[in-house]
Image (cartoon, helix red, strand yellow):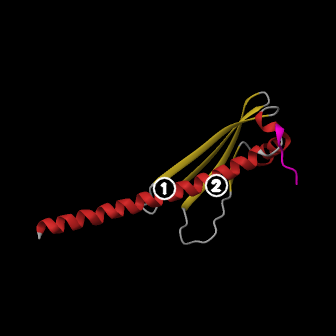
Amino acid sequence: MMIMGLVMGSSVVSMGYGFTRIENARHATRISQILQTEMETLRSMSWEEVEALVLTEGKASKFTVHFEGDEDRIRDLVATRMIVDTKTNMKQITLTATWKDSKHTSHDLSYATWYGKEGLSDYYTRVF
């Protein structure tokens, strides 16, 4: 009986740990998709739009993330955008998201890219 109790107890603990890991992987996937979408939006902007974004919001700013439904919300999500001049006509854009899981453990995820005035991002700009 004692061995069976030990096996049952350890399996319950292992299942709890496994569910927490699944939750963290699901949240990291959702947030990486959000950051990728924001990054692609920034990459499709013209140089003037990126400059205007820096002037209106500053080099470091928070951006809002919206979720459909509330059944699996990510706790305390903060998403920030940092745009820094690295050299003439070149900027480094870093997107960072921090959040907490159900056990209130903090996690973060960052994406970074370089944006050139006449470089990789200059061939396509969005027009509204």
Q: Which of marks 1 and 2 is nearer the N terminus?
A: 1
For disc 1, the neighbor class at 10 Å (few under 14, some 14 to 19, many from 20) is: few
- Secondary structure at numbered mark 2: helix
- Assign the C terminus to one quadrant of the image: bottom right
x then y, percent, for residue 50: 80, 43
Q: What span is in magenta?
A: 123-128
Can you identify the residue that label 2 sits on? 34
Residue type highlighted by circle 2: Ile
* Secondary structure state at the residue bearing disc 1: helix
Residue drawn at x 73%, y 35% as measured from the top left: 91
Q: How far apart are marks 1 and 2 (CA)?
A: 14 Å
Q: Where is residue 29 in the image (x, y as percent from the top left)?
A: 55, 55
Q: Does the magenta stretch include residue 50?
A: no
The location of residue 76, given as percent across then percent down, is 55, 60
Is 118 rendered above or below residue 9?
A: above
| Residue 119's disc number | none
From the viewer's perspective, tell me whether residue 57 is left or right of residue 28.
right
| Residue 78 spot, x, y in % from top left | 60, 55
The reply to whether discs 1 and 2 touch (Cβ–Cβ < 8 Å) is: no
Q: Name the residue under label 1.
A: 25
